[in-house]
């Protein structure tokens, strides 16, 4: 199996916007990571990208299943525009924060929605 995952081919689209497509990519990534293999995620040809897609595809990798060090070593991103690079950093940062303190995030969300 080829460890170079071209996103546009996996989702059959040049728009990576939905959570369901992100979950498909997550499952493809997971097949390599569970065997401790390096996987290359190629965004060539993707015209539109959202945080919803990235949270599903990449963010959930930080759910305490894999360490940041492991992911830094085994997950390689290719062909990301400069404009989208900041979105990647934001998704990773928030995923790490969320999975480090799920209860705190839940409490903050409930407080923001329902008040103290």
Image: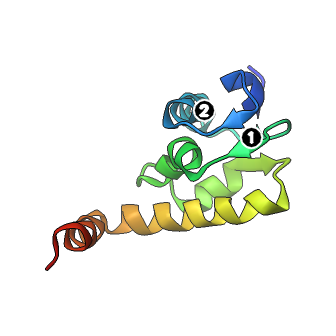
Residue at the (16%, 69%) spot, across then down: 114
The image shows residue 41 at horizontal and vertical percentages of 74, 40
Which residue occupies 65% across, 65% down?
A: 89
Q: Residue at x 76, y 29 (%)?
A: 8
Query: Relative to 72, is 20 above or below?
Result: above
The residue lying toward the viewer, choosing from 85 and 4, is: 85
Q: Is any atom of residue 4 visible in this view?
A: no
Q: Secondary structure at mark 1?
A: strand
Quadrant of residue 102 in the image?
Answer: bottom left
Image quarter of the N terminus: top right
Q: Using a 10 Å C-alpha cutoff, classify the residue at mark 1 as few (fewer than 14 neighbours), some (14 to 19) or many (20 or more).
A: many
On the image, the x and y values in percent for residue 26 come to 55, 36
Mark 2 in CB contact with mark 1 (< 8 angstroms): yes
| Residue 11 seen in the figure | yes
* Residue 92 quadrant: bottom right
Query: Which residue is at 61% across, 35% downward?
Result: 29
Q: Is residue 68 above or below residue 44?
A: below
Pointer 1 residue: 41
Q: Is residue 73 left or right of residue 63?
A: right
The quadrant the C terminus occupies is bottom left
Q: Which residue is mark 2?
A: 25
User: Label for residue 2?
Assistant: none
Mark sitting earlier along the chain (2/1):
2
| Residue at the far front in the pictured view | 114
Question: Residue 51: percent from the left, percent from the top?
Answer: 57, 52
Q: Position of residue 99 (x, y in %)?
A: 38, 61
């Amino acid at each position: 199996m080829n460890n170079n995952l071209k996103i546009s081919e996996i989702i059959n689209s040049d728009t990576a916007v939905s959570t369901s497509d992100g979950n498909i990519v997550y499952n493809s990534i997971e097949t390599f990571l569970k065997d401790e293999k390096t996987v290359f995620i190629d965004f060539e040809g993707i015209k539109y990208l959202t945080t919803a897609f990235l949270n599903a595809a990449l963010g959930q990798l930080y759910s305490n299943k894999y360490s940041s060090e492991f992911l830094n070593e085994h997950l390689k991103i290719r062909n990301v525009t400069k404009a989208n690079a900041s979105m990647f950093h934001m998704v990773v940062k928030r995923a790490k924060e969320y999975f480090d303190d799920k209860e705190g995030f839940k409490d903050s969300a409930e407080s923001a929605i329902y008040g103290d």
